[in-house]
Amino acid sequence: MWSTFFVTDMEGRTVAPVAAGVGAGAAQGGAAQGAGGMASLMSGRSTFGGNKRRRTTSTGNSMSEAQEGKIKLAFFVAIVGVVLTVLGVGTEFWVELAAPKSFYNNQTCLTAHYGLWKGCTKTLWVADIDPGRESCGPAELPGESNCTYFKFFTTGENAVMFQKTTQKNLNVAAAMLVMLSLFLMVMGAVCITMSLSKEIIFFLKPASICFILSGVLVLLSLMVFHQSVLALLASDHTVPLHHELSWSVSCLGCAGAVLIVGGVLFLVLALPCSPWRRCLPQKDSDS
């Protein structure tokens, strides 16, 4: 009387209900079996994602939701370092050079600031400068500014500031170190993105290496740039200059430290088990 039909669940198993007309007891049993089959089918649908999550996590190649949250937090720390690096590289306030206030005349004085790519000279009014300050500046004061890009990377010419000549080899080396650092940041970000999308912890190890090396290269570029500033000051002693590192260098210093911390966090998360879990049981057993 009733046509026999089959129901296939999410895992490919076939559930066949009992045909009607075999008696009251059989009908009740069939109904109970059908209800049980439908209940198991619904439960399979509702817990299918969770079972799959547990199976992939037990193999050791995937991650749990808690691990995913920790990775995202560490990735946010690394992104902060990347933003600070881009901010420092794109600005020209790495170092400020200032001549004495009364070196040229009693009304105006000259200051300069430059970074990796360009330098700016600025003429300030002596009346706007703090009376307790002996040198001209700071560069944030209003005045007539003239900015030009360096020709280190085009014609290979050195720049001249206050009759002093820059050392293009040191400046180019600092710029190349920063660019290599930015490349490693991009590679580390790609590894973290693949780790989160594919749910594979293995990509955390190369990401940690990329971020740690990028932080070290950023700090190394600051050291090379400082040596270039000292070489600039030593090239000529005709004009006495006061120099100080500006806020762009502070951004890069913080960026290098943050990138190294982010890389260490990724390395800790890539370990098979937490170091604290290894140490705490030993302390409890000794006590």
Image: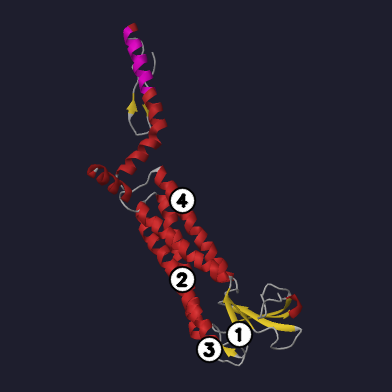
Q: Earlier in the sequence, mark 1 or mark 2?
A: 2
Give the foreground label among 1 and 2: 1
| The residue stretch that appears in magenta | 25-38
Q: Quadrant of the N terminus?
A: top left
Q: Earlier in the sequence, mark 2 or mark 4?
A: 4
Q: Is residue 274 visible?
A: no
Q: Residue at x 50, y 64 (%)?
A: 255
Percent coordinates x, y for residue 232 in the rendering: 54, 86
Residue at image mark 3: 234
Three-letter code for the amino acid on which mark 1 is drawn = Leu
Q: Residue at x 35, y 15 (%)?
A: 32
3D distance between C-alphas at marks 1 and 2: 25 Å
Residue 191 drawn in magenta: no
Q: Quadrant of residue 46?
A: top left
C-beta proximity under 8 Å, tags 1 and 2: no
Give the foreground label among 4 and 3: 3
Instruction: Provide the major secondary structure of the magenta segment.
Output: helix
Give the foreground label among 2 and 4: 2
| Residue found at the very far left of the displayed protein | 286
3D distance between C-alphas at marks 3 and 2: 23 Å
Q: Is residue 231 visible?
A: yes
Residue at image mark 2: 219
Helix, strand or loop for disc 4? helix
3D distance between C-alphas at marks 4 and 3: 47 Å
Residue at image mark 4: 72
Percent coordinates x, y for residue 219 in the rendering: 46, 71
